Structure formats: structure tokens, C-alpha cells
Amino acid sequence: MERRCSACQGLLKYAGREKLQLGQTGWLLGDLPNLLAGALQVHIYYCPVCGKIEFYATEGESGLFEASEPTDRMPQIKCPYCGSMHEMDDPRCPYCGKRLMDAE
């Protein structure tokens, strides 16, 4: 689905899916109300023309809509030892167990 920027009508690019924390921090209870409020999951789009960022809600308690955007996955890298693909934030290859820092 093609989305246009509400400010300049440029074509928006998909930046991923994140959870936005709801609630607010108070001086008496601190972050407790913030934690109890939960989070709203949104799809994030940005405009490369004007720099505007727009959020679109995914499914939620209010039953908004289920977006059909790609799911956000951690980028994959290839292990220099065994050649298998795995998440780039793994400190060790989950397949061969070698430390990835030793390959450098």
C-alpha cells in the first residue's frame, strides 16, 4: 500500500515497527503509571523529501486495523566460520558456537 506524506505529498518510506510507551511519569509515583499504561504498537514511515515522520497504528485494544506491512526482523549476517546466516546482534554463531569478535 502506497502512503503519501501529509505535509508535502512525497512518497513515504517504511522505517519499521515499534512500541510507543503510553502514560506519563509523575513526581509522586515516578514511572509506575507509565509502566502500567502499556504500549501502542505502530508502523513508522518517514518522508525523504521533507523529513516528516508519521505513525500508523497496528492492531490494538480499540481494534483499529491490522497493517499488512512487512514484519520487522533483525538484519542477518553470514558467519565467517560456518557460512550460516543469523541475527547480526548474536555475540556467537548459534550454529557453530564460534565467537564472532575473534574473526576480525
Image: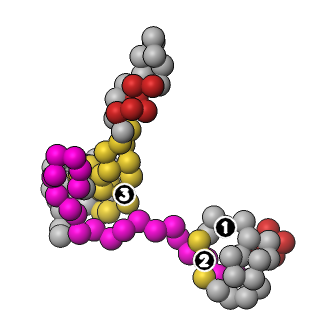
Q: Magenta stretch: residue 61 in it?
A: yes
Residue 1 drawn above or below residue 62: below
- Residue displayed at 64% across by 86% down: 84
Q: Which residue in the protein does label 2 denote?
A: 86
Query: Label 1 vs label 3: CA separation?
Result: 21 Å
Q: What residue range appears in magenta?
A: 59-79
Query: Label 1 vs label 2: CA separation?
Result: 8 Å
Q: Which residue in the protein does label 3 denote?
A: 17
Residue 15 drawn above or below residue 7: below
Q: Quadrant of the C terminus?
A: bottom right
- Residue displayed at 61% across by 69% down: 88
Q: Which residue in the protein does label 1 denote?
A: 90
Q: Residues within 10 Å of mark 1 (few under 14, many from 20)?
A: few
x, y percent for residue 61: 22, 46
- In terms of depth relative to the viewer, which is nearer, 32 or 52? 32
| Residue type (three-letter) at the residue carrying disc 3 | Arg
- Residue displayed at 27% across by 68% down: 69
Regarding residue 104, the answer to whether it shows in the image is no
Judged from the image, the secondary structure of the residue bearing numbered disc 2 is strand
x, y percent for residue 5: 19, 54
x, y percent for residue 48: 32, 57
Asked if residue 48 lies left or right of residue 57, the reply is right
